[in-house]
Amino acid sequence: MPAHFLLGGPLRAGLGLVLLAASFAVLWTSRTIELGIAWTAVVPSLVLLIPAWGLLQRRVLTLDGERLTLTDGWLWRRALELSLERTELEVVPTAGLAAVVVHRGGGSHALATWIRPRTAARLAAWLDAHLPAPLPRRATRLPQGDR
């Protein structure tokens, strides 16, 4: 029997809509400002569209044996099917949030992005609980820059 894991719901979509509305409100008010100063409002509002779009997305992970099906979207759905044989799992910290990535051979695929670290841990535990053997973990490579 397939197991399902849902990423994205009404609360997450609501937060994405709030960010989207804030971005468009800043863009709308920047029309009345002089062009030399308006770019200080336009650039942040365009950058704000990135997390808004990420929060508006919905993903359902369906695990059936060793096959994982990712279904994206609310109305128009697209699906991707992955085999979890010889794969590694990595939880990548991203600006206070996390991304869960599956590595297979030389390629990689993001299972979930823009999620809390606690949700990433729940997703990894869900995968381990529903697979015959837990997926090996890949150590996260952190930059050795200015810290």
Image (cartoon, rainbow, N blue to C red):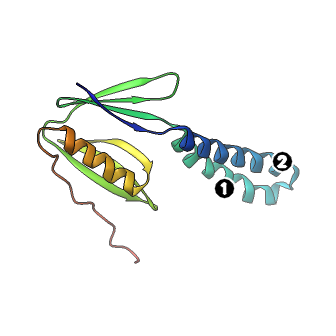
Task: Write the residue at 86% across / 56% down.
Answer: 34
How far across and how far down the image is residue 56, in percent?
Answer: 55, 39
Residue linked to disc 1: 44
Residue linked to disc 2: 31
Q: Is residue 47 left or right of residue 6?
A: right
Mark 1 or 2 closer to N-term? 2
Task: Write the residue at 56% across / 43% down.
Answer: 11
How far across and how far down the image is residue 95, in percent?
Answer: 46, 61
Residue 33 or 62: which is nearer the viewer?
A: 62
Toward the bottom, the furthest residue is: 147
Q: Is residue 77 above or below residue 42?
A: above
Q: Is residue 83 left or right of residue 5?
A: left
Task: Write the residue at 20% across / 55% down.
Answer: 138
Residue 30 or 90: which is nearer the viewer?
A: 90
**Alpha-carbon span between mark 1 and mark 2:** 14 Å
Task: Write the residue at 20% across / 38% down.
Answer: 130
